[in-house]
Amino acid sequence: MAVHVIDEANRCLNCKKPMCQQGCPIHTPIPKMIEAFKEGDLNRAGDMIFANNPMSLVCSLVCNHENQCEGHCILGRKGQPVHISSIENYISDTIFDKMKIECQPKNGKKVAVIGAGPAGITIAILLTKKGYSVTIFDSKDKIGGVLQYGIPAFRLPKTILDRYKKKLLEIGVKIRPNTAIGTALEIKELFRDGYESIFIGTGVWRPKTLGVKGESLGNVHYAIDYLANPDAYDLGERVAIIGMGNSAMDVARTVIRHGAREVTLYARGLASNASEHETAYARLDGAAFEFGKQIAEITDDGPVFENILYDEEGNQTGVDEKMEQIYADSTIISISQGPKSKLVNTTEGLKASPNGLLMTDENGQTTIPGIFASGDVVLGARTVVEAAAYSKVVAEAMDEYMR
Protein backbone atom coordinates (compact mmCIF):
# COMPACT_ATOMS: atom_id res chain seq x y z
CA MET A 1 0.00 0.00 0.00
CA ALA A 2 1.24 3.50 -0.84
CA VAL A 3 0.01 4.71 2.57
CA HIS A 4 -0.77 2.97 5.84
CA VAL A 5 -4.55 2.78 5.71
CA ILE A 6 -4.98 2.45 9.48
CA ASP A 7 -3.03 5.68 10.04
CA GLU A 8 -5.09 7.40 7.36
CA ALA A 9 -8.37 6.19 8.89
CA ASN A 10 -7.28 7.53 12.29
CA ARG A 11 -6.72 10.95 10.74
CA CYS A 12 -10.40 11.23 9.70
CA LEU A 13 -12.23 13.89 11.74
CA ASN A 14 -15.65 12.23 11.25
CA CYS A 15 -17.12 15.63 10.32
CA LYS A 16 -20.79 16.25 11.12
CA LYS A 17 -21.12 17.73 7.65
CA PRO A 18 -18.88 15.41 5.56
CA MET A 19 -17.64 17.47 2.63
CA CYS A 20 -15.85 14.38 1.28
CA GLN A 21 -19.20 12.64 0.81
CA GLN A 22 -20.66 15.70 -0.90
CA GLY A 23 -17.67 15.85 -3.23
CA CYS A 24 -18.19 12.24 -4.34
CA PRO A 25 -20.47 12.01 -7.43
CA ILE A 26 -22.12 8.87 -6.03
CA HIS A 27 -22.06 10.10 -2.39
CA THR A 28 -20.14 7.18 -0.89
CA PRO A 29 -20.86 7.10 2.90
CA ILE A 30 -17.20 7.82 3.68
CA PRO A 31 -17.37 8.67 7.43
CA LYS A 32 -19.51 5.59 8.17
CA MET A 33 -17.22 3.45 6.04
CA ILE A 34 -14.15 4.66 7.95
CA GLU A 35 -15.94 4.25 11.30
CA ALA A 36 -16.78 0.60 10.52
CA PHE A 37 -13.20 0.07 9.31
CA LYS A 38 -11.74 1.45 12.56
CA GLU A 39 -14.07 -0.83 14.53
CA GLY A 40 -12.63 -3.81 12.65
CA ASP A 41 -15.90 -4.57 10.86
CA LEU A 42 -14.63 -4.80 7.27
CA ASN A 43 -17.66 -6.80 6.14
CA ARG A 44 -20.07 -4.05 7.22
CA ALA A 45 -17.88 -1.38 5.65
CA GLY A 46 -17.61 -3.34 2.39
CA ASP A 47 -21.31 -4.16 2.18
CA MET A 48 -22.11 -0.50 2.81
CA ILE A 49 -19.98 0.91 0.01
CA PHE A 50 -20.86 -1.88 -2.47
CA ALA A 51 -24.60 -1.32 -1.87
CA ASN A 52 -24.06 2.37 -2.64
CA ASN A 53 -21.71 1.80 -5.58
CA PRO A 54 -21.27 -1.67 -7.16
CA MET A 55 -18.18 -0.31 -8.93
CA SER A 56 -16.46 0.75 -5.67
CA LEU A 57 -13.48 -1.58 -6.16
CA VAL A 58 -12.80 0.01 -9.55
CA CYS A 59 -13.60 3.60 -8.50
CA SER A 60 -11.18 3.37 -5.57
CA LEU A 61 -8.40 3.01 -8.17
CA VAL A 62 -9.41 5.12 -11.17
CA CYS A 63 -11.49 8.03 -9.82
CA ASN A 64 -10.16 11.58 -9.96
CA HIS A 65 -9.94 11.62 -6.15
CA GLU A 66 -8.11 14.92 -5.85
CA ASN A 67 -11.11 16.72 -7.36
CA GLN A 68 -13.76 14.63 -5.61
CA CYS A 69 -13.71 13.04 -2.14
CA GLU A 70 -10.12 13.87 -1.21
CA GLY A 71 -10.34 17.30 -2.82
CA HIS A 72 -13.19 18.19 -0.46
CA CYS A 73 -11.60 16.81 2.74
CA ILE A 74 -11.32 19.54 5.41
CA LEU A 75 -7.79 18.44 6.30
CA GLY A 76 -6.71 19.25 2.74
CA ARG A 77 -7.21 22.97 3.31
CA LYS A 78 -4.06 23.31 5.40
CA GLY A 79 -2.32 19.99 4.82
CA GLN A 80 -2.80 16.55 3.35
CA PRO A 81 -6.37 15.22 2.97
CA VAL A 82 -7.23 11.76 4.24
CA HIS A 83 -6.22 9.20 1.59
CA ILE A 84 -9.82 7.99 1.25
CA SER A 85 -9.19 6.06 -1.97
CA SER A 86 -6.63 3.77 -0.29
CA ILE A 87 -9.03 3.01 2.57
CA GLU A 88 -11.88 2.28 0.16
CA ASN A 89 -9.65 0.11 -1.99
CA TYR A 90 -8.36 -1.87 1.00
CA ILE A 91 -11.92 -2.56 2.18
CA SER A 92 -13.34 -3.37 -1.27
CA ASP A 93 -10.43 -5.54 -2.32
CA THR A 94 -10.45 -7.50 0.94
CA ILE A 95 -14.13 -8.36 1.08
CA PHE A 96 -15.15 -8.47 -2.61
CA ASP A 97 -14.64 -12.17 -3.27
CA LYS A 98 -16.26 -13.39 -0.05
CA MET A 99 -19.11 -10.88 -0.16
CA LYS A 100 -22.54 -12.42 -0.67
CA ILE A 101 -24.90 -10.29 -2.76
CA GLU A 102 -28.42 -10.78 -1.43
CA CYS A 103 -30.94 -11.10 -4.28
CA GLN A 104 -34.73 -11.23 -4.15
CA PRO A 105 -36.46 -14.36 -5.53
CA LYS A 106 -36.76 -14.41 -9.33
CA ASN A 107 -39.85 -12.49 -10.49
CA GLY A 108 -40.07 -14.13 -13.92
CA LYS A 109 -39.07 -11.00 -15.85
CA LYS A 110 -36.06 -10.78 -18.17
CA VAL A 111 -33.81 -7.79 -18.80
CA ALA A 112 -31.27 -7.38 -21.61
CA VAL A 113 -28.17 -5.30 -20.95
CA ILE A 114 -26.26 -4.23 -24.06
CA GLY A 115 -22.70 -3.43 -23.12
CA ALA A 116 -20.59 -4.83 -20.26
CA GLY A 117 -18.93 -1.58 -19.24
CA PRO A 118 -19.32 0.19 -15.87
CA ALA A 119 -22.91 1.24 -16.59
CA GLY A 120 -23.96 -2.22 -17.80
CA ILE A 121 -22.33 -4.02 -14.88
CA THR A 122 -24.00 -1.64 -12.41
CA ILE A 123 -27.44 -2.13 -13.98
CA ALA A 124 -26.99 -5.93 -14.11
CA ILE A 125 -26.12 -6.13 -10.41
CA LEU A 126 -28.86 -3.76 -9.22
CA LEU A 127 -31.65 -5.40 -11.24
CA THR A 128 -30.52 -8.94 -10.38
CA LYS A 129 -30.73 -7.94 -6.71
CA LYS A 130 -34.35 -6.94 -7.38
CA GLY A 131 -35.21 -10.39 -8.78
CA TYR A 132 -34.86 -9.85 -12.53
CA SER A 133 -33.14 -12.36 -14.82
CA VAL A 134 -30.41 -10.39 -16.59
CA THR A 135 -28.46 -11.24 -19.75
CA ILE A 136 -25.49 -9.08 -20.75
CA PHE A 137 -24.58 -8.83 -24.44
CA ASP A 138 -21.17 -7.42 -25.32
CA SER A 139 -19.35 -7.08 -28.62
CA LYS A 140 -15.97 -7.89 -27.04
CA ASP A 141 -14.70 -11.19 -25.69
CA LYS A 142 -14.15 -9.88 -22.13
CA ILE A 143 -16.34 -7.80 -19.84
CA GLY A 144 -15.42 -4.32 -18.63
CA GLY A 145 -15.81 -2.14 -21.71
CA VAL A 146 -13.53 0.88 -21.29
CA LEU A 147 -12.19 -0.63 -18.04
CA GLN A 148 -10.89 -3.63 -20.01
CA TYR A 149 -9.95 -2.00 -23.31
CA GLY A 150 -9.35 1.67 -22.47
CA ILE A 151 -7.55 1.83 -19.10
CA PRO A 152 -4.00 0.42 -18.91
CA ALA A 153 -3.33 -2.55 -16.62
CA PHE A 154 -0.85 -0.53 -14.51
CA ARG A 155 -3.76 1.71 -13.47
CA LEU A 156 -6.43 -1.01 -13.24
CA PRO A 157 -5.33 -4.66 -12.97
CA LYS A 158 -7.47 -6.75 -15.32
CA THR A 159 -7.79 -9.48 -12.68
CA ILE A 160 -10.32 -7.17 -11.00
CA LEU A 161 -12.60 -7.53 -14.03
CA ASP A 162 -12.23 -11.31 -13.89
CA ARG A 163 -13.43 -11.10 -10.31
CA TYR A 164 -16.42 -9.01 -11.38
CA LYS A 165 -17.30 -11.58 -14.04
CA LYS A 166 -17.16 -14.36 -11.45
CA LYS A 167 -19.41 -12.33 -9.13
CA LEU A 168 -21.93 -11.66 -11.93
CA LEU A 169 -22.12 -15.36 -12.80
CA GLU A 170 -22.40 -16.18 -9.10
CA ILE A 171 -25.64 -14.17 -8.77
CA GLY A 172 -27.10 -15.66 -11.95
CA VAL A 173 -26.32 -13.07 -14.63
CA LYS A 174 -25.86 -14.62 -18.08
CA ILE A 175 -23.15 -13.20 -20.32
CA ARG A 176 -22.99 -13.41 -24.12
CA PRO A 177 -19.57 -12.21 -25.29
CA ASN A 178 -18.70 -11.41 -28.91
CA THR A 179 -22.34 -10.52 -29.54
CA ALA A 180 -22.90 -7.06 -31.01
CA ILE A 181 -26.58 -6.11 -31.01
CA GLY A 182 -27.38 -4.40 -34.29
CA THR A 183 -25.68 -7.05 -36.44
CA ALA A 184 -27.01 -10.64 -36.46
CA LEU A 185 -29.34 -9.83 -33.56
CA GLU A 186 -31.25 -6.56 -33.36
CA ILE A 187 -33.24 -4.96 -30.54
CA LYS A 188 -36.54 -6.14 -32.05
CA GLU A 189 -35.37 -9.76 -31.57
CA LEU A 190 -34.72 -9.06 -27.89
CA PHE A 191 -38.30 -7.86 -27.41
CA ARG A 192 -39.51 -10.84 -29.44
CA ASP A 193 -37.70 -13.20 -27.10
CA GLY A 194 -39.41 -11.86 -24.00
CA TYR A 195 -37.08 -9.24 -22.57
CA GLU A 196 -39.36 -6.78 -20.78
CA SER A 197 -36.84 -3.99 -20.76
CA ILE A 198 -33.55 -3.26 -22.50
CA PHE A 199 -30.60 -1.25 -21.22
CA ILE A 200 -28.02 0.31 -23.56
CA GLY A 201 -24.59 1.04 -22.15
CA THR A 202 -22.43 0.69 -25.24
CA GLY A 203 -20.02 3.52 -24.44
CA VAL A 204 -18.09 5.64 -26.93
CA TRP A 205 -15.80 3.67 -29.22
CA ARG A 206 -15.61 5.82 -32.38
CA PRO A 207 -12.54 8.08 -32.30
CA LYS A 208 -13.09 11.76 -32.99
CA THR A 209 -11.07 12.77 -36.01
CA LEU A 210 -8.91 15.84 -36.59
CA GLY A 211 -10.12 16.28 -40.15
CA VAL A 212 -6.63 17.10 -41.40
CA LYS A 213 -4.63 15.80 -44.33
CA GLY A 214 -2.61 12.67 -43.52
CA GLU A 215 -4.96 11.13 -40.95
CA SER A 216 -5.17 7.87 -42.91
CA LEU A 217 -1.41 7.33 -43.19
CA GLY A 218 0.10 4.11 -41.87
CA ASN A 219 2.03 5.83 -39.07
CA VAL A 220 -1.13 7.40 -37.57
CA HIS A 221 -3.34 5.73 -34.94
CA TYR A 222 -6.24 6.60 -32.62
CA ALA A 223 -5.88 6.41 -28.84
CA ILE A 224 -8.99 4.28 -28.21
CA ASP A 225 -7.79 1.72 -30.76
CA TYR A 226 -4.24 1.67 -29.43
CA LEU A 227 -5.25 1.21 -25.78
CA ALA A 228 -7.49 -1.75 -26.69
CA ASN A 229 -4.39 -3.82 -27.54
CA PRO A 230 -1.03 -1.99 -27.37
CA ASP A 231 0.90 -5.19 -28.14
CA ALA A 232 -0.49 -5.12 -31.70
CA TYR A 233 1.40 -1.89 -32.52
CA ASP A 234 5.00 -1.20 -33.51
CA LEU A 235 5.28 2.55 -32.93
CA GLY A 236 9.03 3.08 -33.10
CA GLU A 237 11.17 5.16 -30.74
CA ARG A 238 9.69 8.64 -31.28
CA VAL A 239 5.94 9.05 -30.71
CA ALA A 240 3.85 12.22 -30.96
CA ILE A 241 0.50 12.33 -29.17
CA ILE A 242 -2.05 14.94 -30.19
CA GLY A 243 -4.23 15.80 -27.21
CA MET A 244 -3.60 16.20 -23.49
CA GLY A 245 -6.53 14.67 -21.62
CA ASN A 246 -6.55 11.68 -19.26
CA SER A 247 -6.70 9.25 -22.17
CA ALA A 248 -3.65 10.89 -23.76
CA MET A 249 -1.77 10.43 -20.47
CA ASP A 250 -2.71 6.74 -20.48
CA VAL A 251 -1.42 6.47 -24.05
CA ALA A 252 1.85 8.22 -23.22
CA ARG A 253 2.57 6.05 -20.18
CA THR A 254 1.67 2.88 -22.10
CA VAL A 255 3.84 3.84 -25.09
CA ILE A 256 6.79 4.45 -22.77
CA ARG A 257 6.27 1.05 -21.13
CA HIS A 258 6.36 -0.52 -24.59
CA GLY A 259 9.81 0.85 -25.38
CA ALA A 260 9.38 4.31 -26.95
CA ARG A 261 12.26 6.63 -25.99
CA GLU A 262 10.85 10.04 -26.98
CA VAL A 263 7.16 10.64 -26.25
CA THR A 264 5.69 14.13 -26.55
CA LEU A 265 2.11 15.33 -26.04
CA TYR A 266 0.84 18.37 -27.94
CA ALA A 267 -2.06 20.69 -27.01
CA ARG A 268 -3.61 23.83 -28.47
CA GLY A 269 -4.03 25.43 -25.05
CA LEU A 270 -1.51 26.39 -22.40
CA ALA A 271 -2.34 23.69 -19.86
CA SER A 272 -3.05 19.96 -19.62
CA ASN A 273 -6.70 18.90 -19.66
CA ALA A 274 -5.92 15.81 -17.59
CA SER A 275 -6.02 15.55 -13.81
CA GLU A 276 -3.00 16.82 -11.87
CA HIS A 277 -2.03 13.32 -10.79
CA GLU A 278 -2.26 11.80 -14.27
CA THR A 279 -0.25 14.68 -15.73
CA ALA A 280 2.37 14.38 -12.98
CA TYR A 281 2.72 10.61 -13.50
CA ALA A 282 3.10 11.00 -17.28
CA ARG A 283 5.81 13.61 -16.72
CA LEU A 284 7.49 11.37 -14.14
CA ASP A 285 7.47 8.45 -16.60
CA GLY A 286 9.34 10.60 -19.11
CA ALA A 287 6.69 12.21 -21.35
CA ALA A 288 7.33 15.75 -22.64
CA PHE A 289 4.66 18.44 -23.09
CA GLU A 290 4.32 21.06 -25.80
CA PHE A 291 1.64 23.77 -25.62
CA GLY A 292 0.16 26.22 -28.12
CA LYS A 293 0.39 23.72 -30.99
CA GLN A 294 -2.40 23.53 -33.57
CA ILE A 295 -2.26 20.53 -35.89
CA ALA A 296 -2.19 21.43 -39.58
CA GLU A 297 -1.47 18.07 -41.21
CA ILE A 298 0.34 14.77 -40.69
CA THR A 299 3.07 13.53 -43.01
CA ASP A 300 5.08 10.31 -43.28
CA ASP A 301 7.67 12.09 -41.10
CA GLY A 302 5.21 13.10 -38.34
CA PRO A 303 2.77 15.91 -37.46
CA VAL A 304 2.99 19.46 -38.76
CA PHE A 305 1.88 22.24 -36.38
CA GLU A 306 1.03 25.91 -36.44
CA ASN A 307 2.20 27.75 -33.34
CA ILE A 308 -0.61 29.62 -31.59
CA LEU A 309 0.42 33.01 -30.20
CA TYR A 310 -0.77 34.04 -26.72
CA ASP A 311 -0.43 37.27 -24.72
CA GLU A 312 0.70 37.48 -21.09
CA GLU A 313 -2.86 36.89 -19.85
CA GLY A 314 -3.13 33.67 -21.84
CA ASN A 315 -5.47 35.06 -24.53
CA GLN A 316 -4.93 33.86 -28.09
CA THR A 317 -3.65 36.70 -30.25
CA GLY A 318 -2.98 34.90 -33.51
CA VAL A 319 -1.15 32.08 -35.25
CA ASP A 320 2.43 32.04 -36.47
CA GLU A 321 2.29 31.51 -40.23
CA LYS A 322 5.45 29.41 -40.20
CA MET A 323 4.70 25.66 -40.08
CA GLU A 324 6.69 23.38 -37.77
CA GLN A 325 7.40 19.80 -38.84
CA ILE A 326 7.80 17.41 -35.91
CA TYR A 327 9.75 14.25 -36.68
CA ALA A 328 8.10 11.16 -35.16
CA ASP A 329 7.92 7.49 -36.08
CA SER A 330 4.23 7.39 -35.10
CA THR A 331 1.45 9.85 -34.31
CA ILE A 332 -1.43 8.98 -31.97
CA ILE A 333 -4.59 11.10 -32.00
CA SER A 334 -6.23 11.40 -28.59
CA ILE A 335 -8.99 14.03 -28.76
CA SER A 336 -11.89 12.07 -27.24
CA GLN A 337 -14.41 9.77 -28.91
CA GLY A 338 -18.10 9.41 -29.68
CA PRO A 339 -20.62 6.55 -29.90
CA LYS A 340 -20.98 4.19 -32.83
CA SER A 341 -24.29 4.38 -34.72
CA LYS A 342 -25.05 0.67 -35.19
CA LEU A 343 -27.95 0.49 -32.70
CA VAL A 344 -29.56 3.73 -33.87
CA ASN A 345 -29.31 2.67 -37.51
CA THR A 346 -30.94 -0.72 -36.87
CA THR A 347 -33.66 0.35 -34.40
CA GLU A 348 -36.59 2.34 -35.73
CA GLY A 349 -37.56 5.14 -33.37
CA LEU A 350 -34.33 5.15 -31.34
CA LYS A 351 -33.11 8.72 -31.61
CA ALA A 352 -29.70 10.26 -31.04
CA SER A 353 -28.48 13.84 -30.86
CA PRO A 354 -26.45 15.30 -33.76
CA ASN A 355 -23.23 14.13 -32.09
CA GLY A 356 -24.54 10.56 -31.86
CA LEU A 357 -25.34 10.40 -28.14
CA LEU A 358 -28.62 8.67 -27.27
CA MET A 359 -31.48 10.97 -26.33
CA THR A 360 -33.02 10.14 -22.94
CA ASP A 361 -35.18 11.75 -20.27
CA GLU A 362 -33.88 12.45 -16.75
CA ASN A 363 -34.49 8.80 -15.80
CA GLY A 364 -32.56 7.36 -18.74
CA GLN A 365 -35.56 6.30 -20.86
CA THR A 366 -34.85 6.63 -24.57
CA THR A 367 -37.31 7.61 -27.29
CA ILE A 368 -38.63 4.02 -27.28
CA PRO A 369 -40.64 2.87 -24.21
CA GLY A 370 -38.85 0.08 -22.37
CA ILE A 371 -35.40 0.96 -23.70
CA PHE A 372 -33.13 2.80 -21.27
CA ALA A 373 -29.56 4.03 -21.46
CA SER A 374 -26.84 5.62 -19.35
CA GLY A 375 -23.07 6.01 -19.20
CA ASP A 376 -20.90 7.47 -21.94
CA VAL A 377 -23.37 6.65 -24.74
CA VAL A 378 -25.68 9.27 -23.13
CA LEU A 379 -23.28 11.63 -21.33
CA GLY A 380 -20.28 11.47 -23.66
CA ALA A 381 -16.83 10.37 -22.48
CA ARG A 382 -17.04 10.81 -18.71
CA THR A 383 -15.90 8.98 -15.57
CA VAL A 384 -16.66 5.52 -14.17
CA VAL A 385 -18.25 6.95 -11.02
CA GLU A 386 -20.56 9.21 -13.05
CA ALA A 387 -21.69 6.20 -15.11
CA ALA A 388 -22.39 4.22 -11.92
CA ALA A 389 -24.23 7.11 -10.25
CA TYR A 390 -26.48 7.70 -13.28
CA SER A 391 -27.09 3.95 -13.65
CA LYS A 392 -28.49 3.79 -10.11
CA VAL A 393 -31.20 6.25 -11.16
CA VAL A 394 -31.86 4.32 -14.37
CA ALA A 395 -32.11 0.97 -12.54
CA GLU A 396 -34.88 2.39 -10.35
CA ALA A 397 -36.68 3.75 -13.42
CA MET A 398 -36.44 0.37 -15.20
CA ASP A 399 -37.79 -1.40 -12.12
CA GLU A 400 -40.71 1.01 -11.94
CA TYR A 401 -41.40 0.62 -15.67
CA MET A 402 -41.46 -3.18 -15.49
CA ARG A 403 -43.59 -3.23 -12.36
Image (tube, rainbow, N blue to C red):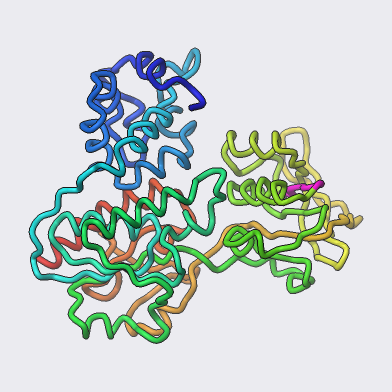
Name above or below for residue 206 compared with residue 287.
below
Residue 162 or residue 298, whichever sits in front: 162
Whether 263 is among the magenta residues is: yes
Q: Where is the C terminus found, in terms of image quarters?
A: bottom left
Q: Height in image: 160 above or below 352?
A: above
Percent x, y for residue 186? 34, 83
Image location (x, y in percent) of residue 264: 77, 47
Q: Is residue 394 magenta?
A: no
Q: Quadrant of residue 82?
A: top left
253 sits to left or right of 64: right
Residue at the spot x=39%, y=68% of the render? 358
Q: Residue at x 13, y 67 (%)?
A: 402
Image point (38%, 18%), residue name: 6
Tell whether 187 sits left or right of 70: left
Residue 170 locus on image (x, y percent):
24, 56
Total labels: the figure holds: 0
Query: x and y percent of residue 182 in the render?
Result: 40, 81
Report the magenta stretch's main SS. Answer: strand
In the image, is 220 to the left or to the right of 301?
A: left
Residue lying at the far right in this picture: please name it.
322
Residue 36: which quarter of the image? top left
Relative horizontal placement of residue 8, taking residue 276 as reference (left or right): left
For residue 180, what is the image quadrant?
Answer: bottom left
Q: Start and end of the magenta stretch?
A: 261-267
Residue occupying image coordinates x 72% and y 53%: 241
